[in-house]
Amino acid sequence: MLRSFQLIKMKIGNLGACVMLASALAGAGCKPEQGKALLKDPTADLPAKFKSQENVPKPDFREASKDPKFQAAIQEAAKLLGAHPQVLKSEAEDEVIRGGVSFDVPHEKTEAMLLEVHTVFLAKGFYLFRYDNNFDAGGHMDRVGLLATADKYAVMAAMDTNGDNYDIGTAGVIAWMKELEQEQPFILTEIGFDYMAGIFTSPVKDAPGLARRMYQFCPDIVDQGVETVKALAAELEKGKLYFWWD
């Protein structure tokens, strides 16, 4: 079942795809990929290693967070973001991420500085990322996390990033993304419990082919997003990377 236009916009609007959603959400008609999704789960043919529900150990950042450099990074982030540090929690389990810090930041400010600030903190060995993009809907702020690691896969494990509605657990997400990184390096500035977003660091070699694979791994970015695999390929050619499991 499709979400409302506003909720979908909250998930992928930052990647410039929102304007492509209107026709998908008007009326009851289905696009070609939507029709396929109703007949067959596109993820059904994924290798078992990507459909994995294997338990992923939760990282414990408490010891690393005691480093004076990380403590200084917290204060630097608070100043740059104009927000007070809070406890970071996993949205999936509402579980405190030990050693993690969170900031409530106005959407416009996050949009304006996320990539630059992420890069600055990554160079220091720390991961600053948005994990909840609210698009200022209802006056709600975005939520930005900071962890004492430079490992995006540790961040995925901490945030329980998953496509569980397609039986793709965190282990499967991590395995798929590691394979992608080998052929097409990327930066992730957003890692949430059901979505990720960022940019590719080099031109995409085979955008149509990658779009087909991404659709198989994450059907919702097409079926409830850009509408066609061809449109997804066009987004990839712009260097944009995103995943979202409804």
Image (tube, rainbow, N blue to C red):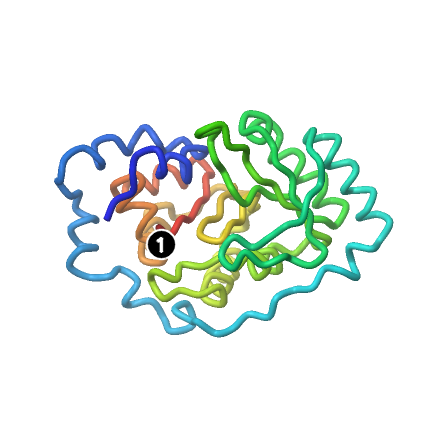
Residue type at mark 1 is Cys
| Position of residue 119 measured from the top left corner of the image (x, y, whole percent) | 67, 40
Residue 237 can be seen in this image:
no
Circle 1 SS class: loop
Quadrant hosting residue 29:
top left
Q: Does residue 108 sit above or below 32 in this rendering?
A: above
- Say which residue appears at 33% left-offset and 42% top-offset: 232
| Position of residue 238 measured from the top left corner of the image (x, y, whole percent) | 43, 35
Quadrant hosting residue 12:
top left
Q: Nearer the viewer, residue 119 or 161?
A: 161
- Neighbour class for label 1 at 10 Å: few (<14), some, many (≥20)? many
- Say which residue appears at 38% left-offset and 73% top-offset: 48
| Position of residue 73 measured from the top left corner of the image (x, y, whole percent) | 78, 42
Q: Nearer the viewer, residue 207 or 178?
A: 178
Q: Does residue 47 sit above or below 141 in this rendering?
A: below
Q: Does residue 114 sit above or below 97 in this rendering?
A: above
Q: Which residue is mark 1?
A: 218
Q: Nearer the viewer, residue 24 or 144?
A: 144
